Image (cartoon, helix red, strand yellow):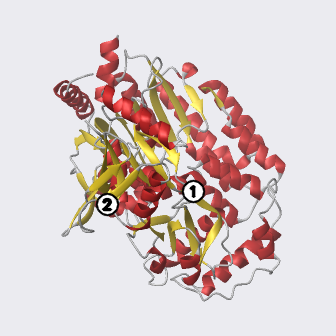
Amino acid sequence: MTLKLGVPSKGRLMEKTFDWFGARGINLARSGSDREYAGVVDGIENVSLILLSAGEIPRELAAGRIHLGVTGTDLIQEKLALWDQQVEPVEQLEFGHADLIIAVPTAWRDVDTLDDLDGAAAAFRAVHGFRMRIATKYHRLTRDFLRLAGVADYALVDSQGATEGTVKNETAEAIADITSSGETLRANHLKILSDGLILQSQATLWRSRVVDMDDADRASMAELNARLL
Amino acid sequence: MATRSETLVKAAALRAMFERHGAAVAEPPILQPAETLLDLYGEDIRARAYVTSDALRGEQMLRPDFTVPVVQMHMADGADPARYTYAGEVFRRQEHDPDRANEFMQVGFEVFDRTDPAAADAEVFSLFAKALDGLALRPVTGDIGVLMAAVDGLDTTARRKHALMRHIWRPRRFRALLERFAGRTPMPASRSALLAGSVMSDAPLVGLRSEAEIEARIAALKEDAAAPVISAMQVDLIEALLDVREVMPHALNRLLDLAVDMPQIAGAVARVAAREQALRGQGVDTDALMFEASYGRASMEYYDGFVFGFRASARPDLPAIASGGRYDALTRRLGQGDAIPAVGGVMRPGLMLELEGAL
């Protein structure tokens, strides 16, 4: 058995993860051509690299098919029910910072808080005959957050990309999405509610709590931990 | 744990009992159009029900309860009065508690009858009490109608009453609104600035919500800020009402006392008293029966009058073994202009067998 380490298969998240491990003497690399999703590990024994979509890493950790994985807090909490029973954060990697937030049109000068959003949603439903639509791909996190805040008369609409554009396109009135600098929000004339922060996320190394390990795996895990901390 | 076939036998026996009592059998399909349920409950239902879809019929839900389809069926072509019973699986998404079942049998009984609501309440409750007899259960009753009457009778603006009514099912939000309307919580700085007219935006307006809607809300907020606060006495009375939690005779005395200072609840309290008489007439020992004014508020439901539940005394980990209540307003919403007083309840044969097995 080898310890399986799941890492995002492309983009900045992959590069930064490789850099982070590299700085700790563990060299990760894609093997072969750029198109091949296989990886090599250098600098530590008994660890293999699995390249995966960042969105699939939570599921693989929870299924115990990988021992360790790098992905955002947002994806872990959105995709895994009772996430803290299934995975454990090993280390925050200090990159991939992003906030999951609720945003509304900047021109809504009467809406600054969740309380305002609730009031505006009630009035919107009375005028338009349907609930205020909030576009997101983070359904569970957004719904739990709004329920705790006592916001009613909204409906979530699914948006898997270009979520900031849904308001202008009139397929949603507000959004719940990830932002890092807020630049895209401003460009789309949206503002963040002052109490609309659902979650602060960053790239994190997670350990699966459900994976089977033998003595050799445990030794490798201890060695890896010692190198990383 | 009872096996599925044992549970089916138990469910059939309970349904037969309701049939002998004169109920017609209702058998709504497992797949229900999602639209009705979404319209009734909003986004919360998605967290509680399984949604599926096909290209032809669109979104469908695995039946999270029987009441809504039974009410729809009755409002479409039911006799008047009518009694229905049913037995079958309901499906509830469980994302927070792995010990809660996501599929279980329910047996229910629903009464649509205009003649004597108190008698209908007592009929449902006493039938349930008989069916559950022998299990160590603790029955609790309440009445959402008393709280609704108290809110409706507040000396304040219609808009504030509407806001409180809208959140009557969300106790925390209800309390926060009440405190705000009573002037007990400071106004957020952004709200003060808005009311002072110092919030400007030169951003282009995107989306469906119009400038007229924004202005209408600002006007409403200004009007609200100018309205007198809800008096401390009225807030205290609502809080005293929510705290009523005693056996029926004492609770009734408390409610009658409160009705002296809150005359608007007198009618609702008289209905509680009439129900107590009717329950007594059906042989229910109301001297030992709990009445909790806030009972049933935290669950996402449609009850607007009498509510009841039976919980296992020795098993606080279990959900209610049986529960029910009056839902007159639901028949109006699903009745397309028509309405009929309605009361009913459900019980869980699987849990009943589990408790019987432990005896």
Amino acid type, mark 2: Ala
Picture quarter with the N terminus of chain B:
top left
Amino acid type, mark 1: Gln
- Camera-side residue: A145 or A163? A163
Residues under labels 1 and 2: Cα distance? 33 Å
Using the image, determine if residue B55 lies above or below residue A93. below
Residue located at (79% from left, 62% from top): B187
From the top left corner, tell me how far across and down residue A61 is, in percent. Answer: 35, 44
Residue located at (37% from left, 28% from top): B128
- Camera-side residue: B31 or A41? A41
Q: Secondary structure at mark 1?
A: strand
Q: Nearer the observer, disc 1 or disc 2?
A: 1
Q: Residues within 10 Å of mark 2 (few under 14, many from 20)?
A: many
Q: Chain of mark 1?
A: A
From the top left corner, tell me how far across and down residue A184 is, in percent. Answer: 53, 78
Q: Chain of mark 2?
A: B
Q: Residue furthest top?
A: B359
Mark 1 vs 2: CB contact within 8 A? no
Q: Quadrant of residue A193?
A: bottom right
Q: Is residue B74 visible?
A: no
Q: Residues within 10 Å of mark 1 (few under 14, many from 20)?
A: some
Q: Is residue A168 visible?
A: yes
Q: Are marks 1 and 2 on the same chain?
A: no
- Residue at the spot of label 1: A200
- Residue at the spot of label 2: B34
Q: Is residue B59 left or right of residue A110?
A: left
Q: Quadrant of residue B84?
A: top left
Residue located at (83% from left, 53% from top): B231
From the top left corner, tell me how far across and down residue A186 is, in percent. Answer: 59, 80
- Camera-side residue: B34 or A49? A49
